[in-house]
Amino acid sequence: MKLSHLFFYFSLVFSSLQGWLVYCFKSSFLDIACFILYAFIFLAGIGIYFQEKKSEKQNPFG
């Protein structure tokens, strides 16, 4: 499994967990903090995905 796929799956799980946490604690600060963390995870996954694509083009057999 590629690292970028792992990041995308984790961001999906985290987004559903965020909704559950905010529903349980009813905290707007928690909602904002979770959203920032989720956005960071998602953007990191996108960055890693493009890095993997770039390295596949340079070395398709490795």
Image (tube, helix red, strand yellow):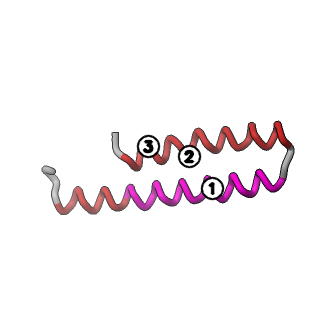
Q: Which residue is mark 3?
A: 6
Question: Which residue appears farthest toward the left when viewing the image?
Answer: 61
- Comparing 57 with 26, the one in front is 26
Task: Residue 6: give x, y in percent of width and height.
Answer: 44, 43
Residue 45 horizontal side relative to residue 12, left or right: left
| Residue 62 badge | none
Q: Earlier in the sequence, mark 3 or mark 1?
A: 3
Name the element at disc 2. Answer: helix
Q: Earlier in the sequence, mark 1 or mark 2?
A: 2
> Marks 1 and 2, how far apart in space?
9 Å
Which residue is located at x 47 percent, y 47 percent? 7
**Residues shaded magenta:** 28-49
**How many residues crowd around disc 3 within 10 Å: few (fewer than 14), some, or many (20 or more)?**
few
Q: Which residue is mark 2?
A: 11
Question: Which residue appears farthest toward the right when viewing the image?
Answer: 26
Q: Earlier in the sequence, mark 2 or mark 3?
A: 3
Name the element at disc 3. Answer: helix
Which residue is located at x 13 percent, y 50 percent? 61
User: Predominant secondary structure in magenta?
Assistant: helix
Disc 2 residue type (three-letter):
Ser
- Whether the magenta-drawn stretch holds residue 34 is answered as yes
Find residue 1 and report its image quarter: top left
Disc 1 residue type (three-letter):
Leu
Residue 26 horizontal side relative to residue 14, left or right: right
Q: Which residue is mark 1?
A: 37
Task: Residue 40: give x, y in percent of width and height.
Answer: 57, 59
Which residue is located at x 66 percent, y 39 percent? 16
